[in-house]
Structure formats: C-alpha cells, structure tokens
Image (cartoon, grey):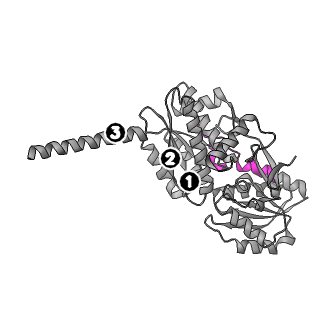
C-alpha cells in the first residue's frame, strides 16, 4: 500500500512538472526575443493606455506574421503600473528579473523616473509618446520618437501670437509631469513674445468635477483671449462638457493628446478647438497614403478605437525596436542603439518619417488643426 501511495505521489509530481513546463512554453516561448512593455492600461489615463497597448499588440502580431526577429518570435511582456509613479520602478524590476534588456516605457511617470535606472543598468528603452523635457538625457540608450513639450509650445505659441497681438491666456492643465511641462514650455515662449498669463488652473488627475474651475474661467472671460487646455486623462470629456455647460465663449487651444483622446465620446465637445499635433490625423484624410488608410481602417475595425497618433507612434516604436534587434550586429543595447542612430538613422514609419539624432531623439513634424463639424482641418 505504501509503495502504491509513493508511486502515486511521484506520478502526480511529474504531472505537475510537465504541466508547468507546458504552461511556461505556451506563455513564454523559450526562443522568443523579449521586450518589456511598461504600460498603463488601467488608472487615471487608462483610455490612453489601453489604446496604446492595443497598438503595441498589433505591431508584435504583424512582426511575427512577417517572420519575427530573424525567425524568432517577438514577445511583448507587459507590466501595468497604472500611471502611478510608485509602481513604475517595481514594474521595471519585475521585467528585469526575467533577464529582459530591451524595453518600451510609456506615460509621463515611468518616462520621468525610469530612464536613469535603465541607463545605469546598461539596458535600452524606446519611448513613443512622452513630451517630458527631462527624457532628453544625453544617453543613446533612451530613444524617443515623439514630439516634445517644447515642440508643442512653439506651434501653440505661434498660433496664439498670429491670432492676437500680446495674447492674454488662461491655462487649465492636469497637475502631473505631462500637464506641467506643457504649461511651462508654452508659458516661457509666450512671455518672451509679449503674451500675458492671466490665470493658471492645475487640477489633480483624479478630478472629474470641474465646476469650480469652469466658474472661475467664465468670470475671467473679459480678461482673456484664449483658454489653453491640457488634459489627456480619463476626465477630458467631463472637463470640456462642464466648461461648455457654463457657456464659456473664448476660443480653446490644446494638443492632440487632449482633443484626440479616445475617452471623448461626445465629439461635438471639441468643435472649434484648435490644437497642435502630429501630421498623422486620427480620422481618414484625403492626404493619407494607401498604407496609412489601410492601417487606420484595420485598427479601427479590430479594436473599435480611433487610430490616433498614439496608435501610430506606439506601432512605429515597436517596429523600430524590432528593426534594430533584427539588423544590429549584436542583440545588445549598445549595438541596437548604434544601429538605429548611425546605420538606420531615418525610418519611414506608418505615422511619418522619423530621424534620430546622436541622443537617439527623433525629429518630427507637427501641424496646427481645428475641429470643424467633427473633422480635423489643417490650419495653413
């Protein structure tokens, strides 16, 4: 009897080991090329993070359908830090424990905190969407393909100055690294050019009741020429709705992260808002290439979400990293970075041309648009 029990226990243990091995094989292919994705599909900016994760998944699927990285599958391993600065480092460390050397880190908290750690560890990261000035760190191991806060600031300031001499501005911005860096960059240029900042309203990213801010802005209408509103969080729609309900009449100027936010379901709220953004528009345009039009259609049909600039950027960022991994002499952070900067240098992505400088920062074009009858119209 004891012998039978012992044999049964051994059999069960072996079955467990085999099941575990099968699970590991299915969940993490042994020969895959792994990329750690520090993302935020939950939290205060989940509307942005979810669409970004979908774009990354589509890029990985396309890469693997085309043969992967020299025949090896590309595997995206995701850690959700929920746009919480306290969770950014643990998310990175969890991925590092899996011997991952290549990362894509997204969102202002992770983009502000993680780069020095990644560089110290000798790892590599791509960033597709952060505007933070601090991301520019002089290291070729921290690549970025997005427009920066100062790029938006130049475009928005030039637009305001072209509309009114010495414009008077009120700011309404989310109180985080993204909102504050955008505000400071715009403010610095406007002050140099004769603009006046009449009022600044910063709100926490968890806020959904904007009646107090909207009331104060309504009271300031006769003292300002424009409202600059910056908010890419899940509260963008209630913010715009509550401002409209008080019949605020001054023109609103913004950025693509605010106006093209997937969380906004009532698109009439963004009518007449002028905004700075990528040459890529979320909706189909007559200037789209056949490839761009097909991509927008495929993404929208697959995920029932608009193919906004964050989609194009994230897709291009993952594909760029894959190009580096496939073509660099070695699959090391230094070799991949050197390939992207010095050998590839310029990449024609789905969202436009990306040209890297020696800091692995991309030079990108942007445009001003205004929403008319629900459609983005480029301002010449």
Residue range corresponding to the magenta coloring: 132-156
Residue occupied by mark 3 = 21
Please name whichever residue, 90 or 134, is drawn nearer the observer in this view of the structure: 90
Q: Quadrant of residue 21?
A: top left
As measured in the structure, the alpha-carbon distance from the residue carrying label 3 to the one carrying label 1 is: 29 Å
Residues under labels 2 and 1: Cα distance?
A: 10 Å
**On screen, residue 379 above or below 180:** above
Q: Is residue 135 magenta?
A: yes
Q: Is residue 107 visible?
A: no
The mark that comes first in sequence, 3 or 1, is 3
Secondary-structure class at tag 2: strand
- The residue tagged 1 is 41
- Horizontal side of residue 275 vs 173, given as left or right: right
Disc 3 is placed on an element classified as helix
Front: mark 3 or 2 = 3
Q: CA distance from mark 3 to mark 2?
A: 21 Å
């Amino acid at each position: 009897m004891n012998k039978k029990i012992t044999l049964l226990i051994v059999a069960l243990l072996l079955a467990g080991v085999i099941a575990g091995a099968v699970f590991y094989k299915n969940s993490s292919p042994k020969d895959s090329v792994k990329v750690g994705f520090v993302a935020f599909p939950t939290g205060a900016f989940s509307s942005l993070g979810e669409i970004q994760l979908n774009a990354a998944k589509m890029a990985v699927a396309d890469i693997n359908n085309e043969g992967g990285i020299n025949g090896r599958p590309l595997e995206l391993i995701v850690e959700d830090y929920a746009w919480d600065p306290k969770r950014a480092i643990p998310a990175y460390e969890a991925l590092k424990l899996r011997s991952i050397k290549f990362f894509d880190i997204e969102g202002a908290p992770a983009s502000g905190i993680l780069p020095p750690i990644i560089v110290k560890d000798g790892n590599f990261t791509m960033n597709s969407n952060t505007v933070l000035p601090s991301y520019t760190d002089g290291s070729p191991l921290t690549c970025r393909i997005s427009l920066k806060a100062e790029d938006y600031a130049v475009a928005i300031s030039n637009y305001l100055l072209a509309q009114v001499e010495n414009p008077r501005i009120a700011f309404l911005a989310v109180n985080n690294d993204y909102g504050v860096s955008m505000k400071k960059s715009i403010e610095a240029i406007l002050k140099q050019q004769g603009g006046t900042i009449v009022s600044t309203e910063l709100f926490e990213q968890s806020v959904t009741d904007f009646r107090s801010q909207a009331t104060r802005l309504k009271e300031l209408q006769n003292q300002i020429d424009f409202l600059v509103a910056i908010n890419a969080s899940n509260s963008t729609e209630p913010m715009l709705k509550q401002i409209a309900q008080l019949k605020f009449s001054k023109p609103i100027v913004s950025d693509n992260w605010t106006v093209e936010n997937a969380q906004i379901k009532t698109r009439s709220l963004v009518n007449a808002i002028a905004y700075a953004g990528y040459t890529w528009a979320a909706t189909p345009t007559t200037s789209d290439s056949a490839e761009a039009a097909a991509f927008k259609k495929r993404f929208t049909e697959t995920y029932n979400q608009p193919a906004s600039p964050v989609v194009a950027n994230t897709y291009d960022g993952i594909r760029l990293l894959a190009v580096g991994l496939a073509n660099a002499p070695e699959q090391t952070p230094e070799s991949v970075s050197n390939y992207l900067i010095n050998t590839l240098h310029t990449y024609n992505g789905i969202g436009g041309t990306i040209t890297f400088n020696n800091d692995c920062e991309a030079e990108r074009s942007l445009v001003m648009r205004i929403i008319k009858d629900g459609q983005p119209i480029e301002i010449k």
